[in-house]
Amino acid sequence: MVIAGLTGGIATGKSTVSSILREAGAIIIDADTIARDAVQKNLPAWHEIVRIFGKDVLLSDGEIDRAYLGGIIFRDSSKNEILNKIVHPHVIQRVAERIEKIGKEYPDSVVILDVPLLIEAGMDKGLEEVVLVYTPELIQIKRLVEREKISDEEALLKVRSQMPIEKKREFATIIIDNSGTIAATKERALEVFDSLKKKVG
């Protein structure tokens, strides 16, 4: 089994690359899905979020209102850090459990940890490869404007609320440049999958 991390920035196309790798045969561990599961009603992380952020973050059914909470942490980086400190340990534990299970059931597999905050959460440590889906900041902004129908200024704020994509390059061992055509991105992603597959064993 070989384990690689997959990360990117907002509007770089990480989800697209993740889908290509899944179709090629990689086992994807999606941290966003795991994080959603970890904060479900009455679980430990849910109780901690409600205790710190108050009951205003709850929907009528008692689940976390992700859009409302997202608005709070986007406006206040200190609250974002608090939320990450609550959620990340639960995500890391669940990821470790998944890896252990996959290792037993599919020992010859290529496992991809699809984690937006891979580097920020320190989850890149000890991985055999760290794959970054890269586009320059200007393209991130352009894509966000088109996708979310927002202004350049709003798009820039969203991009700048994350670790700069150029900084992430320093941590990556493999770059998939997604600033060109989807065909070029797919070709590069499949090259990366083949190189990972050769490491298995």
Image: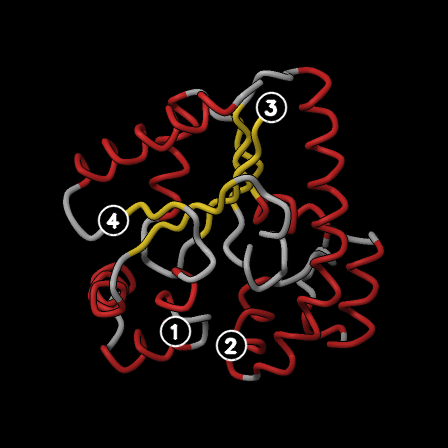
Kind of residue indicated by mark 3: Met
Alpha carbon separation for disc pair 4 and 3: 27 Å
- The disc at residue 93 is none
Kind of residue indicated by mark 4: Asn
Task: Compare marks 4 and 2 and give the one earlier in the sequence.
Answer: 2
Observer-nearest of 63 and 60: 63
Task: Compare marks 2 and 3 and give the one earlier in the sequence.
Answer: 3
Alpha carbon separation for disc pair 1 and 2: 8 Å
- Residue marked by disc 3: 1
- Residue marked by disc 4: 178
Residue 39 falls in image quadrant: bottom right
Alpha carbon separation for disc pair 4 and 2: 25 Å
Observer-nearest of 52 and 201: 201
Q: Residue sitting at 58 percent across and 52 percent down? A: 124
- At numbered mark 3, what does the secondary structure look like: helix, strand or loop? loop
Observer-nearest of 87 and 186: 186
- The disc at residue 74 is 2
Kind of residue indicated by mark 1: Lys
Local crowd at mark 2 within 10 Å, few (<14), some, or many (≥20)? some
Alpha carbon separation for disc pair 1 and 3: 36 Å
Residue 82 falls in image quadrant: bottom right
Task: Compare marks 4 and 3 and give the one earlier in the sequence.
Answer: 3
Q: Are marks 2 and 3 in contact (CB under 8 Å)?
A: no
Q: Are marks 1 and 2 in contact (CB under 8 Å)?
A: yes
Kind of residue indicated by mark 2: Phe
Alpha carbon separation for disc pair 2 and 3: 37 Å
Image quadrant containing the N terminus: top right
Q: Is residue 43 left or right of residue 138?
A: right
